Amino acid sequence: MTVNAGSEKPVKSATTRTTSREPQPIVGRRIGQEALNKLAELNQRYLKGVPNGWCVVIKDCNLAGLNFTGMNFSHAHFIACSFEGANLEDARFVGTNLFSANFDGASMVRTDFTQADLRGACFENAQMEDARLDGADLRRGVVIRADGIQSFRENSTFRNAQMRGTKLAECKLHGADFEGADLSGVNLGGADLRDANFAGAELKNVDLGGANLSDADFRRAILDEATSAKGDMMRATKARTAPGPERMNKILTQHLLWIQSGQGDGARADFTSMDLSRFDFSGAILASAVFKDAILADTNFEKAILAAADFRNAILLRANLAGADLRGADLRGATLRNANQTGAKIGEMEGLTLSTRK
C-alpha cells in the first residue's frame, strides 16, 4: 500500500534507543481488544523510553468497535485504518499518523488529536464533543492499496458529526466537508477553510477569527450573528440575504395575487437559496412558493398553506410545520431534523395527481 500525499512524519519520542530487530508493521489484519491493549502498553513504553517499547505501526487494519478509552497512542502510525464505531473517549493521538483513517460513528469525546496527520480522514456521524484537533492536518489525502485500488474519498469529512466545543484552531482544512455537522462553540480560529463545505451545518458562537474562508460554501449553513461577526466572510459564498419586513410583505401580497389570478397577475414567491431562519410564516398562504436550497432553521410555518411548494434541499432544522398543508410539496433532499410536523397534511392534493415528495 502506498500513500500519494507525502511520506510518513518522523516519529517524535523521548527515546533514541534502537534494537537489532525492530518489530514489523502490522498490515491488513483485524485487531482484537486484547491485542489492542498490548499495543497500547508497547506504545506507552516507547513514549517513556523504557526497554521493550515499540512505536506502533499499523496499516490498513480493522479496529472497528474497539475500546480505546484513555489509551495513549501519540506519535504512532495508523495508516488507512478503520475505527468505525470505536470508543476513543479521552484517548491521546498527539502527533499520530492517521492518514485516511475512518472514524465513522466513533465516540471521540475529549479525544486529543493535536498536531495529528488526519489527511483524508472520515468522521461521519462521529461524536466529537470537546475533542482537540489543534494544528491537525486535515487536507486531501488518497491511499492507493497494493491491488492498485484508490480510496473512494479524498477530502476529510465531518458529515453529520456532533462537534460541540471541538477545538480546530490552526487546522489545515482545505476542502473539508462539514455538511450537516453541529459546530456549536467550535474554535476554528486561524484555520485554513478554503473551499470547505458547510451545507446544512449549524454554527453557533463559532470562533472564525483569522480563518481563511476563501470560497468556503456557507450558502446552506445556519450561522448566528456572533459567528458571522468573528470571521472575514467577504470571500466566502453565502446565502442570499432575507428581505426586510416591507419587502417581505410585498412578496407575500404579490404571491397571493398570483394564486388568486391563476398565475395571471402578481408574482410567484421565490426564496431560492435565501436565509429565512427564525422567520414567522404562520398561517401564510404560500402554495407553490419556491424555497429550494433555502435555510429555514427554526422558521415558523404553523398552519401555513404550503401545498405544492418547492422545498428541495432546504434546511428545515427545528422548523415548526405543525398543522401546515404540505400536500403535493416537494421535500426531496430537505433536512427535516427535529422539525415539528404534528398534524401536517401530506399526500395527494384533492383533484390532482401531485403528491408530497420526500
Image: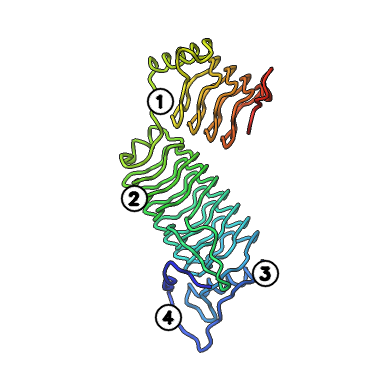
Which tag, 2 or 4, sits closer to the chain's start?
4
Q: Could you tell me which residue is drawn at 59 percent across and 62 percent down?
A: 82
* Location of residue 74 with respect to 277 vertically, above or below: below
Mark nearer the N terminus (4 vs 1): 4
The residue to which callout 3 is attached is 34
Mark 3–mark 1 contact, CB under 8 Å?
Answer: no
Under mark 2, the amino acid is Gly
Q: Nearer the viewer, residue 255 or 44?
A: 255
- Whole-angstrom CA distance, mark 4 to mark 3, is 28 Å
Query: Mark 1 — residue?
Result: 242
Residue 227 or 153: which is nearer the viewer? Answer: 153
Q: Amino acid at mark 1?
A: Ala
The answer to which of marks 2 and 1 sits earlier in the sequence is 2
Q: CA distance from mark 4 to mark 1?
A: 61 Å
Give coordinates of residue 98: x percent, y percent: 50, 64
Where does the image place residue 237, in percent across and percent down from the top left?
37, 40
Which residue is at a point 45% across and 45% down the rendered structure image?
197
Query: Which numbered mark, 2 or 3, is in the foreground of this view?
Result: 2
Circle 4 residue: 16
Q: Quadrant of residue 353?
A: top right
Residue 22 marker: none
Which amino acid type corresponds to the residue marked 4 in the rendered image? Thr
Residue 110: percent from the left, percent from the top? 51, 52
| Residue at 52% in and 33% down | 314
**Dot 2 corresponds to which residue?**
190
Q: Give the distance between the C-alpha atoms of the residues marked 2 and 3, in whole angstroms.
A: 40 Å
Camera-side residue: 22 or 125? 125
Mark 4–mark 3 contact, CB under 8 Å? no
- Packing grade of label 3 (10 A; few <14, some 14-19, many >=20) is few
Q: Residue furthest front?
A: 264
